[in-house]
């Protein structure tokens, strides 16, 4: 049996000891590097190889290896050296080349509400890659694998935007010819059934002579939903363009040294009490309440949403007049530091333009009013907050008095302001006007 060569002792200076102790305890140093530092410290203090290995829960071979390396190269040898590895694809060495048009389309795909989520994720991957993010960081943020990131970056590099779409999948050839598909689509879009306001899959199947399943598949493939209808309202405000550009400009580029508030009133909030007690939710059974109710009166909620912080100033009043609105403006005035200007975004309700309010504003020049276009309340972000409080508190609540309703609303606002989440406006004025112009071209007598 060959004898093990005795190692030379390690002699440390006071400076070496301080540096090794600092590395061995620093949370920013990797655990394996910390352990190597402890090995050297123990060996320098006179511990044997066996004692050091047992104390630090390592092998004697590891102790001898790092002892030898330290004698040769000093403290620098304790750190990991970069590994070489196989060179990556040339495409990954540079940022993806992207035109302004492609960038706009990628942003649209990544933020559009009705787009396929897989496609939205692929668009986000490319946008993050163009910003210089590494594949691993992109994968972590989007909760996908690095392999997925590399796949779609390569597809975009080779095929552009078309490469982000799903490729045709293998399978049996289509049994329905293109002529029949065109006939179904044309009939769906250009005709109506005799005994209904819209087509159903079964009515269309009977009329065309195909199966109900085939009609359903064709409609899904082309995004046709005859059973659904959504509402819309075009603004007839003669200053629609100017107001849109004004409001969007404030949202996307808020003025400095100023507070921006989205202000509105939610009127006629009813204090409704169910005629019988609620039946609580149980496993397999949802919460139930009676369909009829008792009215105990109404209240009006005045609210001002701080666009930057997301905090809300709210106050309930029994009436909805210019007098109450002036009181609410006084509340906003007291809540904002005097050195800041105040920009209010609000609708065209008569209360907001009353003579009483005009005189009040003349005495307070730091207030500036920005009115939304007529029939365009969607441009006021406080409407989104009203939807949230309605969904989470008002709609399913049961209140035996107006006082109880107002107390509940006030408490909900206080809890909301403890952790507010600001709403972020993303669409530009040009994008909004382009969408409106498309609608105007498709309908007659739009007035635009």
Image (cartoon, helix red, strand yellow):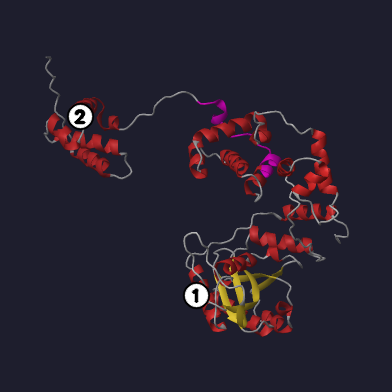
In this picture, which residue range is highlighted in magenta?
Answer: 88-105
Residue 427 is situated, as x and y percent measured from the top left of the image, at 68, 54
Confirm whether residue 260 shows in the render: no
Q: Of circles 2 and 1, which is in front?
A: 1
Q: Secondary structure at mark 1?
A: helix
Residue 102 in magenta stretch: yes
Q: Is residue 66 above or below residue 401?
A: above
Please tell me which residue lies in front, 211 or 173. Answer: 211
Q: Which mark is residue 241?
A: none
Separation of residues labelled 2 and 1 (CA atoms): 63 Å
Residue 448 is situated, as x and y percent measured from the top left of the image, at 85, 59
Q: Is residue 251 above or below residue 304?
A: above
Residue 256 in magenta stretch: no
Q: Check disc 2 and report the residue beneath it.
A: 59
Confirm whether residue 21 shows in the render: yes
Q: Is residue 403 above or below residue 220?
A: below
Please tell me which residue lies in front, 177 or 399. Answer: 177
Please tell me which residue lies in front, 51 or 38. Answer: 51
| Quarter residue 316 falls in | bottom right
Residue displayed at 73% across by 52% down: 431
Residue displayed at 51% across by 68% down: 416
Residue most extreme to the right: 445
Q: Which mark is residue 411?
A: 1
Q: Residues within 10 Å of mark 2 (few under 14, many from 20)?
A: few
């Amino acid at each position: 049996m060959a004898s093990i060569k005795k190692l030379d002792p390690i002699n440390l200076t006071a400076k070496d000891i301080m540096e090794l102790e600092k590395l061995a305890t620093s949370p920013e140093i990797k655990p394996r590097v910390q352990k190597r530092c402890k090995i050297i410290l123990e060996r320098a203090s006179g511990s044997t190889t066996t004692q050091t290995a047992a104390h630090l829960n390592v092998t004697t071979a590891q102790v001898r290896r790092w002892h030898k390396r330290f004698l040769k190269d000093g403290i620098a040898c304790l750190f990991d050296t970069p590994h070489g590895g196989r060179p990556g694809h040339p495409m990954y060495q540079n940022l993806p080349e992207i035109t302004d048009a492609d960038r706009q389309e990628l942003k649209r795909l990544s933020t559009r509400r009705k787009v396929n989520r897989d496609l939205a994720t692929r668009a986000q991957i490319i946008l993050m890659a163009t910003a210089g993010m590494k594949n691993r960081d992109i994968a972590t943020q989007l909760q996908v694998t690095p392999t997925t990131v590399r796949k779609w970056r390569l597809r975009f590099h080779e095929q552009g935007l078309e490469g982000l779409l799903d490729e045709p999948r293998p399978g049996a050839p289509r049994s329905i010819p293109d002529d029949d598909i065109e006939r179904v689509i044309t009939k769906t879009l250009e005709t109506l059934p005799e005994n209904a306001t819209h087509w159903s899959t079964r009515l269309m199947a009977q009329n065309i002579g195909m199966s109900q399943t085939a009609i359903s598949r064709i409609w899904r493939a082309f995004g046709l939903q005859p059973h659904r209808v959504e509402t819309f309202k075009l603004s007839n405000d003669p200053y629609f363009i100017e107001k849109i550009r004004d409001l969007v400009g404030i949202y996307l580029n808020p003025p400095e040294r100023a507070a921006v508030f989205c202000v509105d009133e939610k009127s006629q909030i009813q204090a409704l009490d169910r005629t019988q007690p609620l039946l609580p939710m149980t496993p397999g059974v949802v919460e139930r309440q009676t369909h009829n109710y008792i009215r105990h009166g109404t209240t009006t909620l005045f609210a001002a949403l701080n666009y930057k912080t997301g905090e809300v100033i709210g106050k309930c009043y029994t009436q909805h007049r210019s007098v109450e609105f002036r009181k609410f403006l006084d509340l906003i005035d007291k809540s904002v530091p005097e050195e800041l200007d105040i920009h209010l975004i609000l609708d065209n309700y008569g209360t907001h333009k009353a003579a009483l309010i005009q005189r009040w504003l003349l005495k307070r020049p730091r207030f500036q009013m920005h009115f939304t276009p007529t029939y365009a309340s969607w441009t006021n972000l406080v409407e989104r907050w009203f939807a949230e409080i309605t969904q989470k508190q008002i709609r399913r609540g049961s209140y035996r008095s107006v006082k109880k309703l107002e107390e509940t609303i006030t408490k909900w606002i206080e809890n909301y302001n403890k952790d507010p989440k600001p709403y972020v406006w993303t669409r530009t004025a040009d994008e909004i006007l382009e969408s409106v112009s498309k609608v105007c071209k498709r309908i007659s007598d739009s007035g635009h």
